Image (cartoon, grey):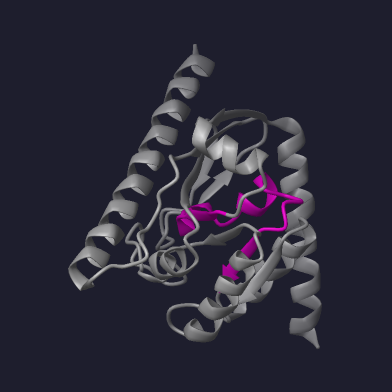
Amino acid sequence: MKRRFLVWLLPLIAVWFQRLIGLTSRFRFLTNERYEELFKNKKPFIYSIWHTNVLYSPYLHRGKNVAVLISESKDGDYINQVVHRFGNTSIRGSSSKGGSKALKAMIQHLKKGLPAAFTPDGPRGPALVLQPGIIAAAQVTQVPIIPFHYECSRQWILEKAWDKHRVPKPFTTFVVSYGEPISVPRELNEEEFEQMRLKVEEAMLNNRNRAIAEAERIRKGESK
């Protein structure tokens, strides 16, 4: 009973905290024409989000009916509630538990023409290392992958957490960065599949670095 109460209460607090931070913040979007075209025409795509960005990604994509792949862990129960409160949906499972079933459900969601999101280094890491599930989903559905990352000019970084999670501070500037869409060929042998995994991982790291650089530029400007 206590845990059920906490699963209800803590996400509620998290949602109100995020909305409050959002009201005090500014936003700088780094995007590209190909992603904007997909979004404008309501084409399906897969957001690829490092675990360090789990906290505010549902807020930044609120009301978009994005299906988020969430682990079946206890922590996943809390994240699941937050995702739904921001107008998105979820599919439970991960590479370590319920993975095959979850991947099939995610593929069905994408085939309906709806967007989805993976945290390809979750739920337990290693951080910033892309696991293969997102490549398989894009390969089967022929839906492009969109690297996504946010950094803030003012933020706490949880240094003791395995993913070095970002927690925005009040009166911050969010730098929200979308990489170029990446298409995965339907036919790949084992070596080509690994090359594609590395390509997406590199694109995600480059997109992360772009967000970090812009946040640092803004931080320096704010400190003058």
Relative to residue 106, is residue 97 depicted above or below?
below
Residue 179 image-quadrant placement? top left
**Residue ID at (50%, 39%):** 178
Q: Position of residue 218 (x, y in %)?
A: 49, 21
Does any portion of residue 185 appear in the rendered image? yes
Relative to residue 167, is residue 76 depicted above or below?
below
Q: Position of residue 121 (x, y in %)?
A: 40, 64
Q: Position of residue 160 (x, y in %)?
A: 41, 59
Relative to residue 82, is residue 173 depicted above or below?
above
Q: Nearer the viewer, residue 5 or 48?
A: 48
Q: Position of residue 30 (x, y in %)?
A: 51, 30
Magenta residues (range): 45-70
Q: Is residue 66 magenta?
A: yes
Number of numbered discs on residues? 0
Does any portion of residue 31 appear in the rendered image? no
Q: Quadrant of the N terminus?
A: bottom right
